[in-house]
Amino acid sequence: MPLRPPARLTSPKARRIRIDFEYIGSRYCGWQWQDNALSIQQVAEKALGKILKTRVRITASGRTDAGVHARIQPTHADVTTRITDTDLMRAMNSVLPDDIGVLDIITVPSGWHARFSAREKTYIYTILNSRRPSVFDHGRVWLYRSGLDEKMMGEAADILVGEHDYSSFRASGCAAKSPVRTLIRADVARDGDIITFIFTANGFLKQMVRNIVGTLVEVGRGRITGNDVRLILNERNRTRAGPCAPPEGLCLVDVVYDTNSDHGKEE
């Protein structure tokens, strides 16, 4: 049976659409275009451009780093087409690779912005605290073979909650104008060999979550204390914090938007 052509609107007009992606970031250099490596943005824009037969810019809620995953990555794009949102979603999923998918596409107000309209974001970082790797979790967790005390890490994580200058957990290449963020949630929980860190904030600095996790692991090993974490935070010096945790354990899982506003302000 031949495929039916995509349903079309009565007339082509410019509109802003929200595209929610999910992806496994293992083989990509991150969300943002790079001259010498394959990015998720590059693949997504080429897929949408192929369908619309024109170049389209896609703006994401944030730039996930190389190897980082997303269960949902909200984005927006301005398009001029008769193709409906539903059929555009189906068309994109038919041309995207297996490790990138579109969860939904909806038309939004012209002032809605995937990045600047975001109110808060949540990341989950996962550690497999085991002496042996898991083939099913490969590329999705940080395999950490030494013992970790999740209670000590959780108590230290509580110290970081609130509005603070997070310069001690900010990557050197971070372009954010201000290092001040409000960390709303920082939870640590264990289920068997799996240790999960959940962070919710009004925004994150570059590699902020990974640098925090790397520091909390130092607490979990007994190398530093919760009081040391407080001192590290207050010193605002990246060299004082722990190592940056590897990217494969990190996943963007939620982005919340202010429903009372069509737009937002730059962080």
Image: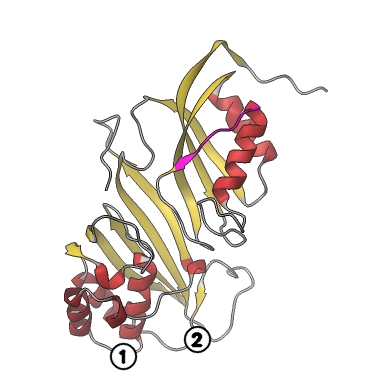
Q: Is residue 197 visible?
A: no
The CA distance from mark 1 to mark 2 is: 15 Å
Q: Is residue 89 visible?
A: yes
* Main secondary structure along the magenta-highlighted residues: loop
Q: Earlier in the sequence, mark 1 or mark 2?
A: 2
Q: Is residue 93 above or below residue 233?
A: above
Amino acid type of the residue that numbered disc 1 sits on in the rendered structure: Gly
Query: Going by the picture, which residue comes out furthest to the bottom?
Result: 223
Magenta-highlighted residues:
53-59
The residue carrying mark 1 is 222
Residue count near mark 1 (Cα–Cα under 10 Å), binned few <14, some 14–19, many ≥20: some
Identified at 50% across, 74% down, the residue is 142
Q: Is residue 31 above or below residue 117?
A: below
Amino acid type of the residue that numbered disc 2 sits on in the rendered structure: Arg
Residue count near mark 2 (Cα–Cα under 10 Å), binned few <14, some 14–19, many ≥20: few
Identified at 46% across, 59% down, the residue is 251
- In the image: residue 64, left or right of residue 47: left
Identified at 19% across, 72% down, the residue is 159
Query: Going by the picture, which residue comes out furthest to the right?
Result: 1
Q: Which element type, helix, strand or loop, lies under badge 2?
A: loop
Q: Which element type, helix, strand or loop, lies under badge 1?
A: loop
The residue carrying mark 2 is 145
For residue 19, the mark is none
